[in-house]
Image: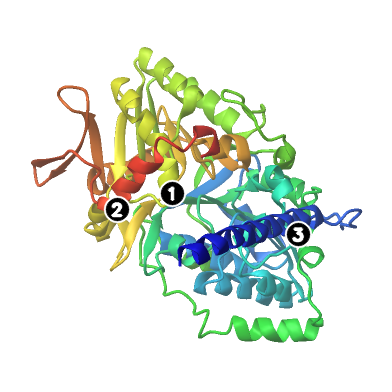
Amino acid sequence: MSSDSSSTLPHVRDLRTRLILSFIAILMACAGCGSLPVDLPRTTSHAIPAAKDSDLGSIAAGSVPDPGVTGFRLMPTPEFSLHARIELALRAQRSLDLQYYEIHNDQTGRYILRLLRDAAARGVRVRLLLDDLHTSNEDRLLLSLAAHDHIEIRLFNPFPYWRGNLFSRYAATLTDFGRLNHRMHNKLFIADGAMAVVGGRNIGDEYFLRHAGANFIDLDTLVVGALLQRLGNLFDEYWNSPYAYPVGSIVRTNDDQTVLRAWFEGETESRSSPPPSPPPDTDLLGYKPIGRELAQGKLLLTLAGADAFADAPDKVARPRGMGEGESNEKQDSVLYNVRSQVRNAREEVAETTPYLVPGIEGMESMRLLRERGVKFSVVTNSLAAIDEVSVYTGYRRYRPAMLRLGVDLYELSPDRVKNNAAKFGEYGSSFGRLHAKCVVIDRKTVFIGSLNFDPRSDKHNTEFGLFIYSAALADQISTLMDYVKIDGSYKLRLSANGSGIEWVTQDGGVERVLTDEPEAGNWKRLLLDVLTPFVPENLL
């Protein structure tokens, strides 16, 4: 037996080695073949400006009579935010321009795509720009939607081959990882050049309280008035960039347009894509659904001055391997403007972000502000709430230093969110996660957008955001943040000896103190401990 075993083991090892080498060779060969189309003809198009002879244009003009001002309506309640998008899609008469990081192939995603199809059937020009990272199970859905007249779909920074799943996509493009690690994280929904929805939400069940497992706490705003021209121009920069590819140039099929349109009809019929339930009568801020106001011909808005910024589309072409301390900041980038506004604060800065890895620059901002006596508070996800444990490892490293600076640090509690349905919605058996990205500066300047406060948003993703100069909106967002801090979070503090961290809640006047990552469970805590020493910050 021993002689037989010794004689066969080298053969097994050689066979295994040959198989591994063959697999690597196949991947390398595919990586060499995984190139994008070149000399691809693209039709340049531009946003259609608002006009008073369209319904939305007329309502916009009546709701914001000063042509130099913009009107806003915050939408913290998920049902209201989805309702707003649906109403804009139903009422559009000229154009719909959508730019998203993700549109899921679920009941919400399919319903929105069907609304785009219906709008196109009315003669509305539809342009859908979608980042290509999370489209693995959506190729045929997107291609079949693009088969309809008046609809054009482009994929931003796409994967050219082996598109069945994310692993095979990267495997087929190993030599192009630097490009593919850059993604378009922007979120924008524009109807008739007259009204837009901007904020942190993608399109999918979990962004609108329709998911059975986990749902996000997030924030969008309706935008009406002067800023719409700027939003349309920013959309056009991406749409007409060389990084946006018509879906038909990336996704191949032998089916003709008739077959594709029929397939789309079956895939998005009402049983698989049911309309959402009507929103409640009022939201957290006391507003009624915008559909009622649109039917009456005038919107109740907060008027203010505002600016909009987007990272340049060519951020995806920047060389990889940037070292610590280097930055992709430009003066017209989102991060540059957020950092500048924050550092100019005189009294108070309050942030919410799902992912918080402040890095050297972020810690320096906090230090400068705290030395000037500026209050600084941050609400982010706890280990129990976060969906990316690897990102949490970076945040964990900075947590004690932030507390020593006197930063007020809060972490979302899924249990407390579920127990406060009046403020956060009926989560049922699902649990809550924070996804809102906003900043309030001196209670008079507001940032709302797609930017997370982490290295990925800085170095790898393109981002989008608004600055709104309004004490009224700042008060509204501060109120929403207080709901999350008081009713949905733990407040963190250093332990008495300064060597540990405590999570504190006040329920019914009784203080409760925990000394380990709350609600996370042993497996998630163990995973955090295992990953923390090995995950480099510049890869988060």
Residue depicted at x 45% and y 67% = 1
User: Label 3 is placed on what type of residue?
Assistant: Pro
Circle 2 SS class: helix
**Residue 447 versus residue 376 in the image, above or below:** below
User: Label 2 is placed on what type of residue?
Assistant: Trp
Which image quadrant for residue 214? bottom left
Q: Is residue 172 visible?
A: no
Could you tell me how far apart the alpha carbons at marks 2 and 1 are, in whole angstroms?
Answer: 14 Å
Q: Is residue 534 visible?
A: yes
User: Answer yes or no: do the residues labelled 3 and 1 have beta carbons within 8 Å?
Assistant: no
Q: Is residue 385 left or right of residue 52?
A: left
Residue 324 is situated, as x and y percent measured from the top left of the image, at 57, 25
Residue under label 3, please give it: 160
Density class for disc 1 (Cα within 10 Å; few <14, some 14-19, many ≥20) is few
Circle 1 SS class: loop
Residue depicted at x 37% and y 66% = 213
Residue under label 1, please give it: 388
| Mark with earlier residue (2, 1) | 1
Q: Is residue 509 left or right of residue 520?
A: left
Q: Which mark is residue 523?
A: 2
Q: Which mark is residue 370?
A: none
Which image quadrant for residue 363? top left
| Mark with earlier residue (3, 2) | 3
Residue 28 is situated, as x and y percent measured from the top left of the image, at 74, 53
User: Label 1 is placed on what type of residue?
Assistant: Glu
136 vs 172, nearest the viewer:
172
User: Answer yes or no: do the residues labelled 3 and 2 have beta carbons within 8 Å?
Assistant: no
**Residue 105 versus residue 328 in the image, above or below:** below
| Mark with earlier residue (3, 1) | 3
